[in-house]
Image (cartoon, rainbow, N blue to C red):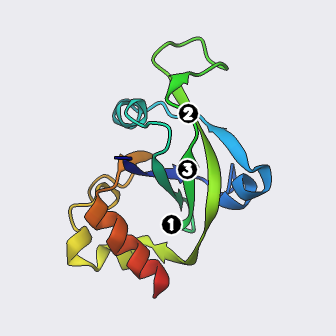
Amino acid sequence: MANRWLFKSDPEHYSYQDLTHDKKTVWDGISNNLALKHLRNVRRGDEVMIYHSGGERSIVGLAEVLSDPYSDPKKKESRLVVVDIRARGEIPRPVGLDEIKKHAELKDFDLVRLPRLSVMQVSDKQWEALLALAKG
């Protein structure tokens, strides 16, 4: 069974709209140890929610992982890995962090507990709750 993840991106650097335009991209730039640990567990076929950090602080779209993790070809550090992803579509409406924090079923979500983490696993229960919020 595929796992589910949340990847954070600063929309001023690379937005979900950029991913939609590009169709697919190499998800790189992860250097935090815990985020790298999570990224090493990502597998081809996994589902991803894309979260815009910065001023937006919202889940904005869905993506699919196209590759298992591999060494970042742009870096010489072997501990740095990347994955390839493609856009799967925007969600019906963005789901903001403030809205997420208000829901009891999401109180243990890493986005709430570890807000600076850029790659995190999303449980099936959390995924369904977040999609329900996106539908209004």
Image quarter where the C terminus lies is: bottom left
- Tell me residue 6's x, y (percent): 44, 53
**Element at label 1:** strand
Q: Nearer the viewer, residue 74 or 45?
A: 45
**Element at label 3:** strand
Decide if residue 83 is on the left or right side of residue 109: right
Circle nearer the viewer, 1 or 2: 2
Mark 1: few/some/many CA within 10 Å (<14, 14-19, 20+)? many
Give the CA separation, mark 3 to mark 2: 9 Å
Residue at left offset 51%, top offset 34%: 30
Circle nearer the viewer, 1 or 3: 3
- Mark 3 sits on what residue? 64
State which tag comes first along the sequence, 1 or 2: 1
Three-letter code, disc 3: Glu
**Above or below for 106 versus 76:** below
- Tell me residue 113's x, y (percent): 26, 57
Three-letter code, disc 2: Ser
- Mark 1 sits on what residue? 59
Mark 3: few/some/many CA within 10 Å (<14, 14-19, 20+)? many
Q: Please tell me in which quadrant of the rendered image residue 18 appears.
A: bottom right
Three-letter code, disc 1: Ile
Kindly indicate whether the residue at mark 3 contacts the one at mark 1 (C-beta within 8 angstroms): no
Q: Please tell me in which quadrant of the rendered image residue 108 appears.
A: bottom left
Residue at left offset 33%, top offset 35%: 34
**Element at label 2:** loop
- Mark 2 sits on what residue? 67
Kindly indicate whether the residue at mark 2 contacts the one at mark 3 (C-beta within 8 angstroms): no
Furthest residue in direction bottom, as rendered: 136
Q: Nearer the viewer, residue 83 or 8?
A: 83
Give the CA separation, mark 1 to mark 3: 15 Å
